[in-house]
């Protein structure tokens, strides 16, 4: 008699960040789910689109789930996962944390966002208070996943325990140089590009105020959009772009400028590098981890000098550096940090790339 097939391991991911939000957290979770499912794991998610929501102050595009505690508890109990991962510290994350702590369910967490920096930029709240709250939230976690070694060291300095690195990847099939393809952007060159949320913590004024030749192009939207458009009328604001259209914009530009000083990683830098764009940035966490000592970008406290020097970097060097980051490798790190009993590790397939926007339709709507 043939042995019965093994039941796929069940992984539950809880995230307050989800579609239609467009950010690195959402893209990371999408790609991770697609990669894990391709490996035969059963992955389900609890996300705000399954609940009544209200807009987050300062960020109306971010929706916060209401009355989540009982429904999240029922969803976890019904699914009986082998591992629970709490991706965010919002209402859903708090509801899942409370259930797991009360019922002795092991869970992992992730540190995606530098909340102390973001909160202090808007409210008169000491960073130490926010760090204390974050330590409380993550303390019961079996592993606190940080996107870089720099962030891991920072968490450890803030007295976090069980911090581990969960890196990121890029879809190398989608984001690539478009040799021979007519450029989407027919603008005076060089074209200086930034992609991301238009918000104060992204420090976009440091980029838009630079005296540079050519054209500055911004892709994205956010609470600072109207202010930036009024203050910098010579810049081109394209709004939010996705998929193949976004990839063509990357490939049509010349330099990617990343002025943020607060990002924990900066996934857009990988997308730019994969498209053949050199990166100009400040020498801070995020760029230091993505670029390292590679000649694929320039980091300098003089951002204008970094921009000028980055123009000399060949596109093939940028592409080669991006090829070091795969979603397959990132998903393997994720699984290892979950510490699921009896789960056999996989051998990495360097040619595998997860879809940038996979169909993540299997959720817990029936349960919640």
Image: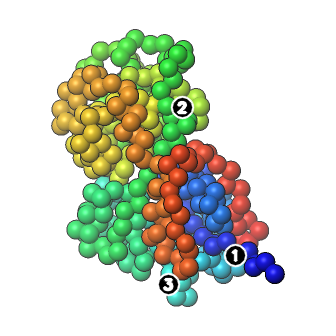
From the viewer's side, name the closer residue of 159 and 350: 350
Q: Earlier in the sequence, mark 1 or mark 3?
A: 1
**Residue 306 appears at what percent x and percent y?**
23, 30
Q: Earlier in the sequence, mark 1 or mark 2?
A: 1
- Classify 10 Å Cα crowding around label 1: few (below 14), some (14-19), many (20 and above): few
Task: State the image quarter where residue 278 is shown.
Answer: top left
Q: Which mark is residue 6?
A: 1
Residue at left offset 55%, top offset 48%: 352
Q: Nearer the viewer, mark 1 or mark 3?
A: 1
Q: Which residue is tagged 3?
A: 101
**SS type, badge 2:** helix
The residue singled out by tag 2 in the image is: 246
Query: Circle 3 — which element?
Result: helix
**Relative image position of residue 132 (x, y in whole percent):** 31, 72
Q: Is residue 90 visible?
A: no
User: Quarter of the image containing the C terminus?
Assistant: bottom right
Q: From this view, report whether residue 287 is shown above or below residue 210.
A: below
Decide which of 229, 281 is in the foreground and name it.
281
Q: Is residue 37 above or below residue 257?
A: below
């Amino acid at each position: 008699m043939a042995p019965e097939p093994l039941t796929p391991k069940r992984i539950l991911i809880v995230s307050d960040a989800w579609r239609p939000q467009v950010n690195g957290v959402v893209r990371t979770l999408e790609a991770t789910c697609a990669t894990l499912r391709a490996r035969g794991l059963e992955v389900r998610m609890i996300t705000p689109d399954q609940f009544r929501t209200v807009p987050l102050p300062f960020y109306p595009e971010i929706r916060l789930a209401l009355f989540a505690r009982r429904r999240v508890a029922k969803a976890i109990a019904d699914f009986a996962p082998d591992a629970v991962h709490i991706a965010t510290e919002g209402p859903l994350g708090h509801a899942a944390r409370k259930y797991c702590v009360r019922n002795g369910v092991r869970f992992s967490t992730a540190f995606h966002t530098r909340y102390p920096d973001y909160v202090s930029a808007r409210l008169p709240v000491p960073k130490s208070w926010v760090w204390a709250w974050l330590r409380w939230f993550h303390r019961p976690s079996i592993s606190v996943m940080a996107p870089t070694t720099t962030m891991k060291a920072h968490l450890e300095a803030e007295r976090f325990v069980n911090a581990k690195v969960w890196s990121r990847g890029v879809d190398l099939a989608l984001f690539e140089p478009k040799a021979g393809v007519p450029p989407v952007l027919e603008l005076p060159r060089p074209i200086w590009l930034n992609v991301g949320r238009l918000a104060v913590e992204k420090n976009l004024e440091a980029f838009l105020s630079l005296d540079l030749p050519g054209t500055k192009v911004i892709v994205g939207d956010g609470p600072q959009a109207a202010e930036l458009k009024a203050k910098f009328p010579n810049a081109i604001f394209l709004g939010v772009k996705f998929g193949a259209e976004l990839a063509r914009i990357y490939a049509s530009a010349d330099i990617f400028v990343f002025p943020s000083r607060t990002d924990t990683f900066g996934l857009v830098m990988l997308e730019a590098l994969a498209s053949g764009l050199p990166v100009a940035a400040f020498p801070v966490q995020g760029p230091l981890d993505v670029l390292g000592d590679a000649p694929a970008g320039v980091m300098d406290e003089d951002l204008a000098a970094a921009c000028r020097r980055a123009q000399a970097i060949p596109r093939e060097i940028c592409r080669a550096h991006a090829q070091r980051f795969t979603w397959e490798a990132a998903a393997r790190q994720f699984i290892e940090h979950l510490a699921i009993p009896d789960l056999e590790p996989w051998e990495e397939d360097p040619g595998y790339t997860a879809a940038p926007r996979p169909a993540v339709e299997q959720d817990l709507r029936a349960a919640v």
